[in-house]
Image: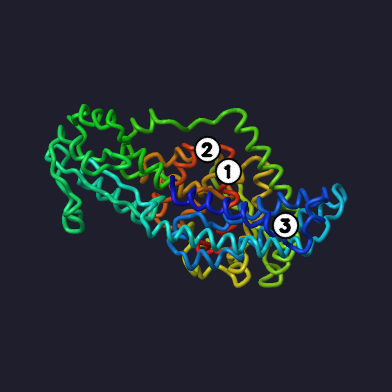
Amino acid sequence: MTTGKALFLLDILFVLMAWPVILRFGCWGNECLDATPDGLATLLYPAANLVSLYALGLYRRDAIIDTRGSLARVPMAVGLGAVATACGLALLVPFIGAPVNRVRLFAGAVLAFCVAGMLARAVFLVLKRGGMFRRRLLVVGAGERARDLLTMLDDEGANPHYDITFVTDAAFGATHPDLLQGRPEKIVSGAEDDLLRVAREVQPDEIVVAPDDRRGMNLESLLACKREGYPVVQYLSFIEHEVRRVDVRRIDLGWLLYSDGFYFGTIDNALKRALDVLVSLMLLVLFSPFLVFGAIAIRLDDGGPVLYSQQRVTRNGRPFRIYKLRTMRVNAEAAGEVWAAVRDPRVTRIGNLLRQSRVDEMPQLWNVLRGDMSLVGPRPERPKFVEELGRALPLYHERHMVKAGLTGWAQINYPYGASIEDARAKLSYDLYYVKNFSILFDLLIILQTLRVVLWPSGAR
């Protein structure tokens, strides 16, 4: 179990303990429990609280590592969930009647869930320091591939602590000098047919097969480990599961071909389209005042056109015109097409504000309604850049198996990029999304987009 899932279960446990106590011994007591309208409220408040904790990224690796920062975000998440529930209940008044003691119910929810969230993280920290979430790995190989695995786990692994032992042998390739210098005590020399003995000594939770040269590997020794009860997993599958992206630098087309994924069922596609239409309509209505104010501000700023359109590429390489509120000066690309840059001098004063708040992206909801884009998918690139990146990056065009998206797995996990290396990193997330597409995955990405909007460090 990942640390994020463990923390989520702790949150559920503490919410289940705290909320009934508040309802029972609070000022409203039995009056609230016996009233039918508040029966709905008592369910919505804890559910919205857990959803809000997830939406603000409190189960992500960075929040788990930074306990102090995570504790500071708990009240914000709790308040957001309570406000959302209170607004939802107010809208439902014509159908369910007015809940009794709405003010005290709101105050009780904020108090109970703040305490529960902080206690859950305090208990989690104690368990983490006690080594409960430490994962023990045995990595077959100690070359470049093993070094890359170690780097990715240190930077992005689903668990903050790994105890890794590397098995090196001439058959697996040369040992990487970084591993020899950094952790020589964790490198074990052993012949291929001696893996079971090493596994019995290390007692790993998982054996990761990551040699630089797999030709002629003794699979019998790995099978013996598996028979003994040690899970054996291939390097690429382990990275996909643990880091939640595809290692495009070491991609194996055979693994990609025979592994699960890249399946788009009729029901999933229909649900995705329904989600696109319903959410887009709701957001257009909700954010229409911001669009109007943004349009007026653009006109007052420099008198130029409000909307800006540009050709982009979507599913199956089909070009379409994307719409945004204009954030750059008129004729910003008179000298040719270039990637946006940090503190781009072409961005206007109002444009910078619109970009940071993401209001400039709202007209793309029209593209979603038209079917050019989806709410979730890889970000659409311009045809010129698609051609360049397709030549530079293997499997780049595979991201066009789905519609381009307003938000996506790469957007919520990687900051805005303006180079080939950035494009390669984002491609690793896009391929993971395409490979693991589901309507539930889309919903989780939409929820986490709220975190990116509130902390827009990657906006340009």
Disc 3 crowd, CA 10 A, few/some/many (<14, 14-19, 20+):
many
Q: Position of residue 12 (x, y in %)?
A: 58, 51
Vertical position of residue 288 compared to residue 431: above or below = below
SS at badge 1: helix
Quarter holding the N terminus is top left
Q: CA distance from mark 1 to mark 3?
A: 34 Å
Q: Which three-letter amino acid code belongs to the residue tagged 1?
A: Asp
Out of 14 and 135, give the one closest to the viewer. 14
Q: Which residue lies at the image location 74% right of the left edge and 62% below the top edge?
A: 26
Out of 418 and 156, give the one closest to the viewer. 156
State left or right for residue 217 relative to residue 114: left
Residue, disc 1: 442
Q: Earlier in the sequence, mark 1 or mark 2?
A: 2
Q: Which three-letter amino acid code belongs to the residue tagged 3?
A: Leu
Vertical position of residue 354 compared to residue 388: above or below = below
State left or right for residue 411 relative to residue 392: right
Out of 452 and 71, give the one closest to the viewer. 71
Q: Position of residue 115 (x, y in %)?
A: 60, 64
Nearest to the eye among marks 1 and 3: give it. 3
Give the number of the disc on residue 186.
none
Q: Position of residue 187 (x, y in %)?
A: 18, 49
Q: Which residue lies at the image location 49% right of the left edge and 48% below the top edge?
A: 5
Residue, disc 2: 437
Total number of numbered discs in the rendering: 3
- Asked whether residue 248 appears in the rendered view, the answer is yes
Residue, disc 3: 23
Disc 2 crowd, CA 10 A, few/some/many (<14, 14-19, 20+):
many
Q: Which residue lies at the image location 56% right of the left edge and 65% below the top edge?
A: 73
Residue contact between numbered discs 1 and 2, judged by CB atoms under 8 Å? yes
Q: Position of residue 388 (x, y in %)?
A: 41, 47
- Asked whether residue 449 appears in the rendered view, the answer is no
Q: CA distance from mark 2 to mark 3?
A: 40 Å
